[in-house]
Amino acid sequence: MNAEGTSRRAWGQRLRIGALVLLAVLISVVSGSAQQTDLVQERALAYRAARSQHQAALDAWTVREQQWNDAVEEHDRARRAGDGQRTSAALIRALDLGRELDLLERRVKDQRTVLNTARASLLAALDNRIVSLNAQLGGARTAADRARLTALLRDLENQESDLEEEGQVQLVAVTYYPSIQFDMRDTPQTLGYKAQLLRSKAEQQDSVMKHIDREIERIDRDLRRNRNAQSLVTGVERYGDIQVLVGAPNRRTSPGDVRARPDSAGVARPEMTPQQKIGYLRLLRGQVEAAKRQFLQRAADFENQARRIG
Amino acid sequence: MRTALGLLLGALLVAMPASGQNRVRELELNGGLSVEAYRGNLAAATASVVDSTDRAYAAIGEVGARGTVALLEAERRWLFLNFDAGLRQFAAGGFAVRDYAPREWVGQGALSYSELLGGWGVATARAGWRGRSVKDRPPMPLFLQPGFGISTASLKLDLSEIDRVRFDVLADLEWADYSATRLAHQLDLLDRRSQGVEVGASWGDRASVRVFGSVRNSRYANQMTFDPTDPFRRDRTVAAGLSWSIDSPVTADLGVEGTVNRSNSRRPEYDALSARSLVSVPLPFDVGATLLAVVTGKSYVNQSDFKVLVPGEEADNASVLYLDLARPIALGLDASLRLGWTRAEADVGNAYFQRFGASVLLRYRPGGF
């Protein structure tokens, strides 16, 4: 009796342990699956947020690029008309917009990095989910389960493929003068016109670059003369060697005030130093050169396309 | 003085590494060697020693730094630190009593805060200090400014253009404290407090003209008038001037300024006229020539045998001429040859001292500032 009773208790204990283990396994499988679903959802949300931020940065860049392009064109027109004041105003505006364009381009790049990271995380989560669903599909007992899991798998694979495609599209750099684009309705003739327009834009960039180079040279010459004058004055005033000027004793001109100047948005900032102006002119030149390269590349693409269609 | 210089350099070092070129708007380090000769056997009221020579000479070495750091550069408001400091060591000879080795420490720093006032213009508040210290100050004819500390505070309004004319108004306060020594206690006579207002109008873009007028009240707490009802010297200085400047194709700044100084003390009442020109032109072989000339004429209203002026302090008749030939020799490094001549009237009327100098200087601008 005692032996029988002991054996029954042992069996009962084993059954209880087995039931607990089974429960634990079930809970872990169910929660793991739920966690995977949550992770995909969470990363999909993060990806959508990153994508909209990237799009916002890109839109801001495009708006500024249009203003920048207008300023560069206005500068070229004013220069051809020989209007010095208009040329100078357009150049200042182009310089301001060039700086803003540069900042926005950096923001686009930063957002693109965030977007790429979010995409890679989402792809990894989708991969894990697909592997897990494939395992479930292998063990599915009913046709209804198999159909449901297959549909889920197809949906996830489509999501994955869309993400990869989006990644390819977003690799393209920011586009200058984006209003000239390929259209499905384009004939060889319209493609030729578009190529011609882009080539004339590239020539315009050449002329702007030449002017910027001359401007940099001019400021550099002025800067050197100014520095020579400033160094002489500060050098002799520093030790009071020139303090025989009239006025209150020991009066000395205070270091130059920094005047205000309005930027392209009408907001006053401290006046640029000549060195800063040279730096911004170089930045503008780089942007104009990048735009020119894009125009020539896109013109060649349009011409190739026209040849293919024609 | 050295503490002040240390503070300035410390501020620069703090500002520099943080964000480099965006914060340092300008930076120049310079140094050089000079030889100078001095002529004139003169008395100087504030020199603690006298010497019978009328010819002296000196070899001089100097180092210095100046620059502007943007501490805040935001839309509509900005805060800048300007600094300028230097050390000059003389090895002077030719004196009858002994040779001298004067050393000058000089420095100045100013914090200026500007803010846009809607569409009206820009207001700039400035607080600054400058000072100098001279060890082993020699007798005439080697004239060196005495040591002092001067604090200033000012408020300036640059108004927006009206019919292409820009107006500016400046109000300032100044506290000057001269470093009197046991043997030259009369330097304390120059201690003063003053307040002034200057109004200017300028127009033109590449070539600009500025006319200005100013009034300044100065009070010398250590100078007696011998009038018991009004015992301390009080001056009122009215000045007016005109300057013309151009940036391209040559750099030029020409100006003339007239001054009328009236006082409750008869001795320092004077009328003066000063002309100044600064012209910098490019020459072949990348050489830039810069000429600085200042001519000052002064006449006292009341002739007096009793004068306690410091030569150069309250301007007497003087002519100053400097020619600088500079050429870049490496990236950010310029070398210059500087020739200078000064002829100034001392505190004894019609007695002039002269200074001739030649210097070789190097100017370095790190990081392309």
Image (cartoon, helix red, strand yellow):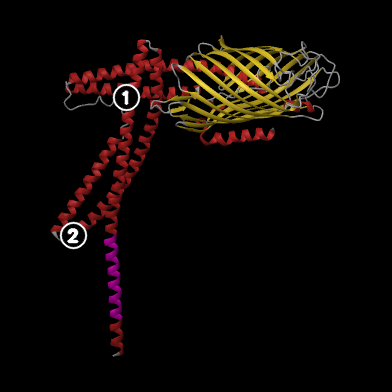
- The earlier-in-sequence mark between 1 and 2 is 2
Left or right, B35 with reference to B152: right
Q: Residue at x 24, y 42 (%)?
A: A162
* Residue A210 visible to the viewer: no
* Amino acid type at mark 1: Gln
* Residue B49 vs residue B169, the one in the foreground: B169
Q: Residue furthest bottom?
A: A1
Can you identify the residue that label 1 sits on?
A294
Based on the displayed image, in which of its 4 quarters is residue B344 positioned? Answer: top right
Between B63 and B257, which is closer to the camera in this rendering?
Answer: B257
The residue where tag 2 is placed is: A140
- Residue A301 lies, with reference to residue A151, above or below; the image says above
Image marks 1 and 2: residues in contact by CB distance under 8 Å: no
Specify whether B219 is left or right of B23: right
Magenta: main secondary structure equals helix
SS class, disc 1: helix
User: Does residue A200 appear in the picture of this structure?
Assistant: yes
Q: Residue drawn 28% across and 20% down? A: A198
* Label 1: chain letter: A
Q: Is residue A16 magenta?
A: yes
Magenta-drawn segment: A10-31
